[in-house]
Amino acid sequence: MKKPITVSGLVQSGVIQNNLNSTLPQFKSQSDFSNQIAIFLPLAQIQPNPYQPRSIFPDAELNELAASITEIGLIQPIAVRKVSDMAYQIIAGERRFRAFKLLSKTEIPCVLFTATDEDMAVMAIAENVSRQDLSDYEIAKSIRTVESLFPSRTRLAQALGFQREDMYRYFAYEALPLFLLEKLEMNPRLLSRNAAADIKRVLNKMSAEQSEIALSALTEAIALLEAAQIDQTKIASFIATRVTQATQAETATLNIQKQHFFLQDKKIGHFLSSEKGLEVKISAGVLTDEKTTELKKILDDFFRV
Amino acid sequence: MQYCKYSLFPLSTFMRNFGVKLKLAKEFVGFVGSSSEFRTLFEKKGTQYHNIYSALDIRNARLKLLGVDLAALPQQDKLPPIINCRMAKGGTGKTTICGGIASALSMFGYRVLMIDGDPQASLTGLFGINWATENITHIGELMLKFSRKEDYSLTEAVRPLYEGKMLDLIAADISLVNTDSWLMGITNREFVFKKFLDANVDFFSQYDVILIDSAPSTNLLTNALMCACQKILAVVWLDGQSLKAMQILASNVNELNDAFHAMGFHLDVHIVANGYHPSYSPCKDALSTLISSYADKMNNTVIPHAVSFMKQVELFKEENSGTVLEREPNSIAARAIIDLAKSLVKEYGIKLSGIQVI
């Protein structure tokens, strides 16, 4: 059977060109019409931005906003995109939208924009990140939800205007233990991204035996943090200190000691005591057969006692 | 019926006895297993070797494979996607593409309603219906009665073509041309058709997709048919004259978008190139211009210049006419139509009884 003809196939084989200079009249896209003239849309047709990072909208703030809207009206229309017939999504202005709902209004002034999912995500985060009132944890969560829209984390960082290192600090939250994440859900401001990154780093350094001690130290530190008895920046060092103290207590009786043997200023072996045991090492050819037998006998006698 | 090599059902007025053989049926269902496994999907067919699979068979098989209980499916309450074949020039293949993808989409198992929106009634003729001798209730008459709040019956206006409501047609005749004269006096006339669809959402939501064959002229009826859509399907014949008509279409679409932007209305355009012939250099030039101008709006399938398309309509035996898929299912032309239909499922978000199948 003959191969079907496709545009991409013809372009690839060079039969047709896709970069001619003279082109036909263009169809204007929706954003070409976004002339900042506000239109009134029914509240029922508007949905919040699915990528909205803000999870808490304090009632007091909304009431304040609603009061100001009743007093002087809405100064700035909210920005929406059309997702289907009679359905719009908020690009920016969810608080204003909520305030309008609070006032039992049926319509809200909107400006239409075209936006892809990627744009929506970036706009929602970028708009909020620059504000003071969004916690690092909420930003981290929203970055996580939109991450899959981007081909790589580098591109994600570029789109959001973050330094790459800084973005990885936001990713540190996910390495935290479950109990802490639950606490963060309740109180997103508990830990900043720097504190989270420090805690992640100190937890990662721990060996398997130490991690249990580290976890209990962390639990203790969080309790102190909640009681405002410790600064969140000190938590990492708090854990590290606790772990070192505990390990030192264990190994206090068995200090690591190494003693070298010399023969005419040349190292020919050593004696090592550590928590793993005692080790005596002597280089090959130093001891004669007789001496070796003697040494074995001494050790043998030593245990026979 | 003579046109169809494979006959399934006793004949009724305009009901067509179209079905495809195993290989195509497997493609339409999207079945990857063996042929004997495939046959077990169809109860009545048993283990017979030479089977013909109708659009309804394929729909049922797809739903079965998806594990969907038909009775448990919720009643749809939203209008299905609308594909309006439109071009500001005649003879570019609007009707051929419209009829072709209609039969292909229903063979993919989707329930399709076609609306002939052209007073020339070529879509009606493509399916072997002679508008001169038939008693036809066209879309203009239905809209008129709707806007005058008179009684009308959609079920009587619709002609079933494939069994099981798989392909239905609201036919047209020459009197559709009168629509403009009364539309002139109606307020908000651009949205009469949209309102008509919304008012009859119970009826139209039975279908998975609605296809409209529009007239080439830019008038009140074609505007009204466009204003109910989100994206028109512009069929462009690959020559200079057809490309010139893009200018008219662009200004038409831009004007509507400009006028109704404040209502949140925006009409998009999807373009399919038709009539490509590898040894005609103007075809290549035209396609180069088209892709350079509208790269992000082009469908990847290019419909070839093929003799099978010319054989669709029988001049003196009109009842024998049929789409290229019905008449020559294994031709290169039918292949292009099937590929186009498949891509439109994605482009327009066509769902199987509300189920999005990827």
Image (cartoon, coloured by chain):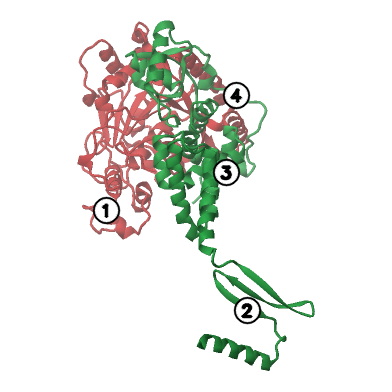
Chain colours: A green, B red
3 or 2: mark nearer the eye = 2
Q: At which x and y percent is residue A198?
A: 55, 44
The subunit letter for the residue under badge 1 reads B
Q: Amino acid at mark 1?
A: Leu
Q: Earlier in the sequence, mark 3 or mark 2?
A: 3
**Element carrying mark 3:** helix
Q: Quadrant of residue A53?
A: top left
Q: At which x and y percent is residue B227?
A: 40, 19
Q: Is A175 above or below relative to B34?
A: above
Q: Which mark is residue A24?
A: 4
The subunit letter for the residue under badge 3 reads A
Spatial CA distance of label 3 from label 1 is 36 Å
Which residue corresponds to mark 1?
B41
Q: Quadrant of residue A292?
A: bottom right
Asked whether, in this view, residue B37 is left or right of residue A114, the answer is: left
Which residue corresponds to mark 3?
A9
Q: Quadrant of residue B35?
A: bottom left
Asked whether, in this view, residue B288 is left or right of residue B167, the answer is: right
**Looking at the figure, which quarter contains the N terminus of chain B?**
top left
The subunit letter for the residue under badge 4 reads A
4 or 2: mark nearer the eye = 2
Which residue corresponds to mark 2?
A280
Residue located at (51% from left, 51% from top): A242
Q: Is residue B227 visible?
A: no
Q: Are marks 4 and 2 on the same chain?
A: yes
Spatial CA distance of label 4 from label 1 is 50 Å
Viewer-proximal residue among B225 and B230:
B230
Q: Is A277 above or below relative to A94?
A: below
